[in-house]
Image: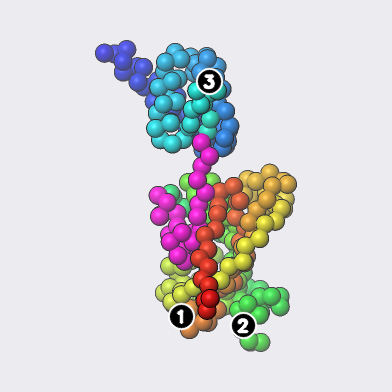
Amino acid sequence: MEEKKTTKAKFDYVSAEIEKRIHDGIYVSSQKLPSEYDLAKEFDCSRLTIRKAIDDLISKNILVKQRGKGSYVMSQPKIQSGRAGLQGFTEAAKAYGKTSRTEVISFEKVVEPTEEIVTALQLGSDQTVYELVRRRLLDEEPMTVEKIYISEEYVQGLVKEDFNGSLFKLLEKKTTIAYSHQEVEAILVTPELSKLLAVPMGNPLLQVHSMTYSLDATPIFYDISHYRSDRYVFKTTLTRYGQ
C-alpha cells in the first residue's frame, strides 16, 4: 500500500512539473517532449510513472500523443475577443475561467493631444484628455498592452491605483458603455513591446484601434492596444444590408 502511494505521489509530481514547464514556456505549443526514457532518467522514476503522468496530461487536453512518434504539447486555444459581445479584459478572463491581473504603467494628463486623438474623442479646445497605459495578464501570462485616451470628465478625481481592475466597471459608474468600433492590423513587435509581452523580436503582434461609445454615440475612450497574435483572435460579426 505504501509503495502505491509513493508511485501515485511521484506521477502527480511529474505531471504537475511538466504542466508547469508548459505554462512557463519551457515546453511550447506543438513541441515534442523528451522521450519517456529521458524523462524517467531526469525524474529518477520508472517509465510507467512517466506514462501515467503523460496520460494524465492528455486527459486534461494539455498533451497529445502520436503512436510511434512521441508526446507533443497541444496547441493552446487562443483567447477570442468579441466571443460574447463587447466585454472588458477582466470580464473575458472570467468567462474563460482564467485569472486576470492588471499592471498600470502610467496615468497622466496629455499636454498636447495629437490630431488623431482630438478627432477620435471629438474634443473641444477646452477639454482635457488623459493617457492610461496598462499591461494585462492572464494567469500571469502577459497578453496585451493598452494605451487608452479618455476625456477628463470620465476620470476626474481618479488616480493611477484606481485602474488596477476593470475599466468598464469603473466607467459604468458615470456612463453606459454601448458599443465599440475596432480596426485590427498586424505589425512587427517593437523592442519595448517585446519586453512587456514576452514576444521575440521579429514576431507579429495584433495592433487594435478601438473607439468606444455611450448609448447616445458620445465617444468615451480611444484605445490603441497590442495583443499577442499567438494567444489572441478577434471575432467580428458582419451584417449585409439591402441585398
Judging depth in this view, the residue of 75 and 145 nearest the camera is: 75
Q: Earlier in the sequence, mark 1 or mark 3?
A: 3
Q: How many marks?
A: 3
Tell me which segment is drawn in magenta.
74-97
What is the C-alpha distance between the residues marked 2 and 3? 62 Å
Q: Residue at x 50, y 45 (%)?
A: 77
Residue that badge 1 annotates: 215
**Disc marking residue 241:** none
Label 2: element kind? loop
Q: Earlier in the sequence, mark 1 or mark 2?
A: 2
Are there few (<14), some (14-19), or many (20+) residues within 10 Å of tag 3?
few
Tag 2: amino acid: Gln
Q: Residue at x 49, y 49 (%)?
A: 138
Q: Is residue 174 above or below residue 209?
A: below
Q: Earlier in the sequence, mark 2 or mark 3?
A: 3
Residue that badge 2 annotates: 122
Label 1: element kind? loop
Are there few (<14), some (14-19), or many (20+) residues within 10 Å of tag 1?
few
Residue 45 sits in quarter: top left
